[in-house]
Amino acid sequence: MPLLTSDARGVFMISVTPFTDDGAVDWDSLDRVVDFYFDKGADGLTILGMMGEAPKLTQSESRAIAERVIKRAGDKPVVVGVSAPGLAAIGELGRAVMDMGAAGCMVTTPGSLKTDTQIHGYFGQVAQTLGADVPIVLQDFPLATGVHISDEVLARIIDDIAQVVMLKHEDWPGLSKITRLRRAEAEGRRRISILCGNGGVFLPEEMARGADGAMTGFGFPEMLADVVRLVDSGDLDRAQDIFDAYLPLVRYEQQPGAGLAVRKYVLAKRGAIASSAARAPSAGLTPEAITEVERLLDRQTKRLQELN
Amino acid sequence: MPLLTSDARGVFMISVTPFTDDGAVDWDSLDRVVDFYFDKGADGLTILGMMGEAPKLTQSESRAIAERVIKRAGDKPVVVGVSAPGLAAIGELGRAVMDMGAAGCMVTTPGSLKTDTQIHGYFGQVAQTLGADVPIVLQDFPLATGVHISDEVLARIIDDIAQVVMLKHEDWPGLSKITRLRRAEAEGRRRISILCGNGGVFLPEEMARGADGAMTGFGFPEMLADVVRLVDSGDLDRAQDIFDAYLPLVRYEQQPGAGLAVRKYVLAKRGAIASSAARAPSAGLTPEAITEVERLLDRQTKRLQELN
Amino acid sequence: MPLLTSDARGVFMISVTPFTDDGAVDWDSLDRVVDFYFDKGADGLTILGMMGEAPKLTQSESRAIAERVIKRAGDKPVVVGVSAPGLAAIGELGRAVMDMGAAGCMVTTPGSLKTDTQIHGYFGQVAQTLGADVPIVLQDFPLATGVHISDEVLARIIDDIAQVVMLKHEDWPGLSKITRLRRAEAEGRRRISILCGNGGVFLPEEMARGADGAMTGFGFPEMLADVVRLVDSGDLDRAQDIFDAYLPLVRYEQQPGAGLAVRKYVLAKRGAIASSAARAPSAGLTPEAITEVERLLDRQTKRLQELN
Amino acid sequence: MPLLTSDARGVFMISVTPFTDDGAVDWDSLDRVVDFYFDKGADGLTILGMMGEAPKLTQSESRAIAERVIKRAGDKPVVVGVSAPGLAAIGELGRAVMDMGAAGCMVTTPGSLKTDTQIHGYFGQVAQTLGADVPIVLQDFPLATGVHISDEVLARIIDDIAQVVMLKHEDWPGLSKITRLRRAEAEGRRRISILCGNGGVFLPEEMARGADGAMTGFGFPEMLADVVRLVDSGDLDRAQDIFDAYLPLVRYEQQPGAGLAVRKYVLAKRGAIASSAARAPSAGLTPEAITEVERLLDRQTKRLQELN
């Protein structure tokens, strides 16, 4: 499998981890959802991320899932989240998944990083630990990590650590950050790929600002793929029409915690996984929430029909 | 002016504070925006909240603004945010605005509260400090305060502190909290009014779950008023149609920090205030953001025309 | 090895993890420091805690260290820290170390717990995951975890989860918490063992309030053992004399981050481990700090001689 | 009264705010404690700081206290804490106290500052708001504010904002920060005064590293004055002997929250204030705590007698 580069574009879906109703990893559904993502237009996958319930897996499960997904994805790129409390664990998992054929490793900022110097230093240590041949995706997600990465520290990381090839962008608000990054590149800084997260809730604007695509989860990968393709082809209005049709559900999936349950419910309903079960500790959807989701799905279907 | 009760319903707009371009309070625009909110369907106002740039005001400005707005609002209820680091300041401001004719005082949780017992004890102290005749709006906003109010502690507050008559609900995700509150009331607990915040981004679902209305800011108060009225009249589909037309802008205004600049831009464009200036420290809208907002406004206008 | 019970008393040393200068686990030093702790008066050990650099270990290293220490400790109890982001990993490590002969598992509160109900629920899930026969040490360390455990929630945990047999107490300030716990027990609540952390900096007062001993790290385990023994025998003044002699160093070791480097420096100087190296990311002692520590050690030696 | 300069040295006591038992400001005791601090060796005072219960005061009380203390202090310098959520309030209070004769204004970092650039920008705005003639004390207290000021950002502030003349240093651990600051000054950077906080718990080491004195609270100001004087005169051993005698109480006062109650208890016992009452919300000392404090005071007296 080819390694991730700073020219990467398109939609990388953050894959869910399917479980059976009694909490075991559902390997058949894992294969199925991988196929589903690619059938619906994904260009790559990202696994073992926060929304993939990675912290609820044992280490042996994490490795087995990585191995299975990378194999199933064939020649499509798979990014693996390797964030861990210590460098030794990051190195151990990172080297293992690269040997399996991963396209790169995604790393976020531990909450213990307090200053710009510490953030810069941390990614230097991570790069050294993983080895210079491993492409790194820097996950910038202050709402979840509590760590804010300024333009200045991002510039220093890009300048000093060549193997950081991609920014998983989910600062919020973060539109200006994209504009400033692209402007700096126009003035000579090394280019990196920018894929956007946050459930795609700002995707049309992010693409218009210069992002290369999306790296996030959503029950309808085809929306993300369509929006990215249409903005790339210059049809921002059509992109926004599609986006708006899905926006009520995108918004509903944005609820922290509850969002994952909605996403799994939608994927199960669409046949991509057998069960919407999440592993404990986790709350399923209440009957009231199911009513709301079904209503949003009905309206979404009608709206999409009007668009065609 | 009548005091706030637990039967309060409808839309309370979180008012912006208008400034001139050189940072002074713009008193004419303050009158104008008060009139604007009521013209567009607001049932009441809330001032000196976080989004009203209250922390950027001097104490004498805060009092003068409260006096002006309460007078201008006439017989419409005005809730005043009185959160402060200490009880003495809360009591001082609270009693002052009640003497001016405020309908009630809104108080949120200081970040120093760490346990359920401390949260419960704090509102007891606030109630005692303000005096038993002052209606209290409890602002539940964990994303901003870092304090999470569980069902249990909310129940204890409702049981023990009769003057807490309203919940400003902006827990996120918080739909289930509304359902559980209403269910407990059906089983005998004292009723309180629930007005929802978060820019109205879940308003249709919140109303369907039993909320009494909205207490939030948005450049188009008529959307909030329409949604509340339509859900109350049983027409959830029409409510959601209206809501969906505004949702792309609602979403755009949800950006922390940047959201206020968008809101003031829209209000200035609509003639409700003279200038979109926010008081320092504050960033205005970049040219890119103005392009995005104008595009969303154009699309919104068209979508609303299609609905009528 | 016997399991931990709620009658446990004495000093459980939080063991350092010795490394060679190039960052490998130093197995010989691990044996040596285990012997050292017991020679100096420890009644038990606690491993894989935060101060033991557990997050910097790979999972295979963690298990190998647990196995080696448990074996070396012979019939002395070894508590193993099994905190992890998810229940599956806690269960996997917890069952493995119990099979090796651990006396119990120590678990702290993940930062995601926001309310009393969530804290109580979490320990219920942990207990179920580990199995009812596994004694649990509840680590109450708000400064590090950001989670505050109130008297009320602690009472609910003690009432509902019989296998929670010990509180590792490092709330700060926490003296009143000990008093209130013991008072509740006098009125009929189930007793639990209370061992105190925070480097022992309040140990004389904690023992006088009813604690059963210490569970913490320090370069001079004999101080902790002497203080616990002397307070138990009623000689509070002599206990405080000993304590005061070591207090300047105890205080110096209290510096977050730097404290571990001091502790390892002292242990290496005393021959308990071969090298004071900590695993990256970590800062060693600067020359200025070494001068300060050496000065404190000199003064400590003189002060102890005066006491004898 | 002369303005604060970067050559300031000695002990600035963080003054308590005395209250009567029913919660009113005790103006007679305020005079008395000011005299007490200077009698016991203080070189200056700092008022309206966090430990002075400033957040519990109304704005009119804050101003009246500042006026009274500045007048009573005569030609001794008084620094006034003016931290507030917004620049307008900082400017209003700052200019008012400078007009009363304050020596300078102390400002800390609001928790909303997330990056180095934001921290640097904030102090630039504060400086501009206060006016170029107002000396600023930068309070660096990450444990309380959650904001960490790196060497780099501190250097940028010192380089760019000439009116920042003093660092109130309570980073923890922060010994190396002093060393690095002084080293940079030796290499040409502008000198600033460094006064240390944290209850003086590292004062001997801080002085030896190049600090200019202490700015903190403690029931025995004479200890701080003696340690500063003795280290300045080169007698580090005698300084540490004095320090060690008080250290058990210094440590006991370090308990967050409870520490203030201990300090007021000691000051009331010494006759410096009439009542140890703190203003609500606040917990007084329990009988067990009083027993512990009295015991520490007895032992401290004996130890000091042995030293003389």
Image (tube, coloured by chain):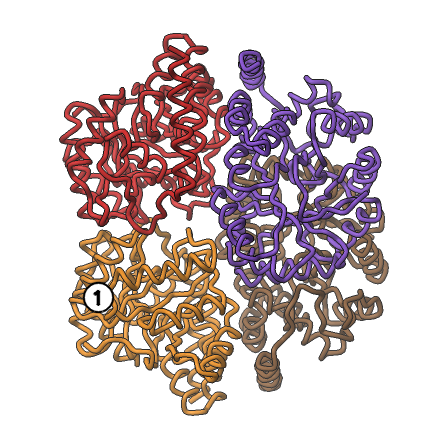
Chain colours: A brown, B orange, C purple, D red
When the figure is inspected, residue D143 is found, relative to residue B82, above or below; the finding is above
Which sits in the foreground, A155 or B68? B68
Residue drawn at (54%, 49%), measured in percent from left and top? C182
Which sits in the foreground, C18 or D174? C18
**Image quarter in which the C terminus of chain D is found:** top left
When the figure is inspected, residue A282 is found, relative to residue D202, above or below; the finding is below
Task: Please indicate, yes or no, whether residue B278 appears anywhere in the rendered image.
Answer: yes
Residue drawn at (40%, 26%), measured in percent from left and top? D200
**Image quarter in which the N terminus of chain D is found:** top left
Q: Is residue A47 left or right of residue A74?
A: left
Which sits in the foreground, A113 or B132? B132
Q: How many marks?
A: 1
Protein chain holding label 1: B
Q: Is residue B53 left or right of residue C87?
A: left
Task: Please indicate, yes or no, whether residue D159 appears anywhere in the rendered image.
Answer: no
The crowd level at tag 1 (other Cα within 10 Å; few <14, some 14-19, many 20+) is many
Residue drawn at (48%, 53%), measured in percent from left and top? A176
- Occupied quadrant, residue B287: bottom left
Residue ID for mark 1: B30
- Occupied quadrant, residue D191: top left
Q: Is residue A251 left or right of residue B13?
A: right
- Residue A244 percent location from the top left of the image: 54, 75
- Residue D68 percent location from the top left of the image: 15, 36
The amino acid pointed to by label 1 is Leu
Which sits in the foreground, D214 or A265? D214
Q: Residue furthest front?
A: C234
Q: Is residue D23 left or right of residue C171?
A: left
Q: Secondary structure at mark 1?
A: helix
Q: Residue furthest top?
A: D234
- Residue A1 percent location from the top left of the image: 83, 53
Residue drawn at (34%, 28%), measured in percent from left and top? D215
- Residue D248 percent location from the top left of the image: 45, 27
